Amino acid sequence: MRKLYHSYIENFRGLSKEIWLLSLVTFINRAGAMVIPFLSLYLVNEKGFTLPQVGIIMTCFGVGSFIGAWVGGKLTDAIGFYKVIVLSLFFGGLGFISLQWLDSFYGICIGVFGLILIADSYRPAIFVACDAYCKPGNLTRGIALIRLSINLGFSIGPLIGGMIIARINYEALFWIDGITCITASVLLFNVLKPKKRKTDETKEVVTKEGVSPFKNSLYLLLISIMVFNGMLFVLYFSVMPLYYEKAHFLSADLIGLLLFINGIIIVIFEMPLVGWLERINISKTMATFWGVVFLALSFIVLNLTSWSGILVIGMILMTLGEMIGSPFSNALAISMAPKGRKGSYMGLYSMSWSFAHIIGHNMGMNFVDSLGFDITWYVFFGILTIVALMTLWLLKLLKRSKTVTTY
């Protein structure tokens, strides 16, 4: 047992103090992120919107995320990741608090768009911050630690959020989410003031190497893979809670508990898993491939039986895909970014997930509304099979490329 403990702790050694501080701030921020997993339920149960209307609102979520990631990437290259992160957290917190007072369909569309635009400018900045503070060879583990803090927060958030909905009301979620975002911004402002980093960031902005991400064909293929994979992954936070409620009759607190399984598995197993995969020298692209495969399996198993325990199996498979695919695809994207353009490259990477929000939620809601859950899961499995083949194609092209040294 002691050997296992020391082996687990060893995966965290060598990471800088700044990475740990960023992880703490990210955890505080994500622990309050209770609104997002329950947003579709809130819009249906509290506001009385139809599934297609919820799909449109979630599309506004995606458009805001898309533009926010682009703006965040540009601002990160222009003013540095530190200011972008602090401002995004603070004003995003105010946005979450304000969202609860919107009632009309168009008002909520506009409110969700504006809120997520501000909140998701955080994403490219945190990746660039991770790259800036990680020691050589620690980037993938640094990203994994940031993801661990995100998922620890997400595991606690939905669990508490489900209890709050069951015992108080939905509005309390908006207050908690907003306050935790503001708290995270204040903490970051006080504990991490990168005075020495400002010079480094300025140099990176002045000296730009390579081509723009929009002219890098291999990077665009990676982005395409991320879009299609993300389109279906994001449905675990919009369509899937509805499936749990409508098809398996789970209550809000049980849904929160099911989402908690995802987060707690990641918290316990992701760092050891990433460390082991690095030790066996799996390529970043091949890890991305296996992430897609496990996500595909998580959908198809839902059609095997009506037993509600299959939901846990599906969640575990999705979580495996997330643990394997996400840190390595992040690391692959950063490693493909030339010096001075990391903000733009990671902005586009974040935009791929934002674009997935734009298409995925609306597509998923309309598929379920017209085809039902079972056929929808078959369609998603087919799409992800194609995405897995695209990933193998990317690996082949990266091996052939003379301009890319890591894959």
Image (cartoon, grey):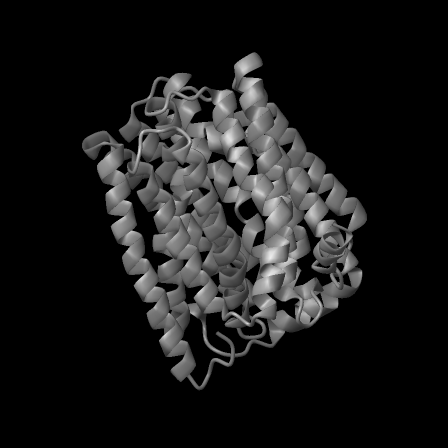
Residue 128 showing in the rendered view: no
Residue projecting furthest to the front = 1
Residue 181 vs 253, above or below: the answer is below
| Residue 24 position in % (x across, y down) | 72, 45
Q: Quadrant of residue 375?
A: top left
Is any part of residue 138 visible from this angle? yes
Is residue 281 shown above or below 89?
A: below
Q: In front here: 372 or 46? A: 372
Q: Residue at x 44, y 46 (%)?
A: 317
Residue furthest out toward the left: 370
- Horizontally, residue 198 falls left or right of residue 118, namely right
User: Is residue 349 toward the left or the right of residue 164 in the image?
Assistant: left
Residue at position x 40%, y 73% in the image: 395
| Position of residue 248 measured from the top left corner of the image (x, y, whole percent) | 36, 24
Q: Position of residue 29 (x, y in %)?
A: 64, 39
**Residue 296, placed above or below residue 245:** below
Q: Nearer the viewer, residue 327 or 175?
A: 327
Q: Quadrant of residue 25?
A: top right
Tell me the residue at 68%/54% (across/down): 82
Instruction: Give the quadrant of residue 386.
Output: bottom left
Tell me if residue 232 comes above or below residue 195 in the rendering.
above
Is 17 positioned to the left or the right of 343 in the image? right
Give whichever of 111, 269 is nearer the camera: 269
What is the number of callouts on the image?
0
In the rendered image, residue 173, in percent from the top left (x then y), is placed at: 57, 24
Judged from this view, the residue extending furthest toward the top is 167
Identity of the residue drawn at 56% across and 64% down: 277
